[in-house]
Image: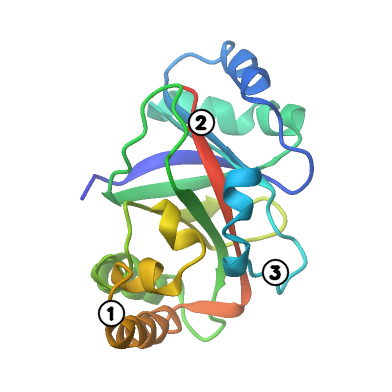
Amino acid sequence: MSAHDDRLLIIFYGEVPTTEAVRLALLDHTGVSFAALAMMDEHSEKAGMWTRDPLGCLPSGRLAIEADRDSIKSLVTSPLAENLGGVAYLCEGITPLMPKLNVGERFLGTLQLCCFQRRADINSAQLHQYWLQEHTDVALSTQNTLGYRQNRVSISGEPHFDGIVEEYFPPEASHSMEAFFADGDNEARMWEHIEKLTQSSERFLDLDRSEVIHLSDIRII
């Protein structure tokens, strides 16, 4: 598991900028070590069965930026998000499973982006315990996950979210529950995994205040 690092996520709720527009915008900011832009396309639309939009504010894209601490602070206070047409979320990022994504490459499968609000009856310490400590192994053991990033939001834009999850899945998981939860070959195990994952998730997140969408992710830097 990686160390806890500051990450800037810019979430788009309307038009998503092009990769070239993002690349040009980041030229003015030194210290950026990673940037990836995710958006809807024909590839990710195949995963439409997983979309959830109970709040009516479904993201259309996300830009993830990693940099040294001083650069992240500078990016948060800069007009970058506004200029690109997005909303900034400063996060404490944890990566239990690093996705394989080279510069200039689109991830072969899809990125599942889940933006959630925590349950109203738990506090910040409980969210950390249930999600970032106890839930991690459950998520990785019950899903066919190829990459997993947990982002606890420390400074939230609007709409407000407490956490943002980035999970990477293989292409076959786009349209197959078996491939998503059980490698595609065991229906009984699939339902066992669904039950276990749901019980763990419901300890900390409010499913009625959670937005979920699958996107195609391209690494820019």
> How far is the residue under mark 1 from the one under mark 3?
29 Å
Of pointers 1 and 3, the one earlier in the residue sequence: 3
Of pointers 3 and 2, the one earlier in the residue sequence: 3
Figure coloring: rainbow
User: In terms of secondary structure, where does tag 3 sit?
Assistant: loop
Q: Position of residue 26 (x, y in %)?
A: 57, 18
Based on the displayed image, in which of its 4 quarters is residue 62 positioned? top right
Q: Position of residue 185 (x, y in %)?
A: 28, 74
Residue 49 seen by the camera: yes
The residue drawn where x is 64% and y is 45% is 42
Label ID, residue 53? 3
Residue type of the residue flagged with mark 2: Lys
> How many numbered circles are shown?
3
Does 38 sit left or right of 99 as displayed? right
Residue type of the residue flagged with mark 3: Asp
Based on the displayed image, in which of its 4 quarters is residue 25 positioned? top right
Q: Nearer the viewer, residue 212 or 159?
A: 212
> How far is the residue under mark 2 from the one under mark 1?
47 Å
> How far is the residue under mark 3 from the one under mark 2?
31 Å
Does 197 sit left or right of 40 as displayed? left
Based on the displayed image, in which of its 4 quarters is residue 144 positioned? bottom left
Of pointers 2 and 1, the one earlier in the residue sequence: 2
Label ID, residue 186? 1
Does 83 sit left or right of 147 as displayed? right
Please identify the quadrant where the C terminus is shown: top left
- Residue position marked by numbered label 2 in the rendering: 73
The mark lying in front, picked from 1 and 3, is 1
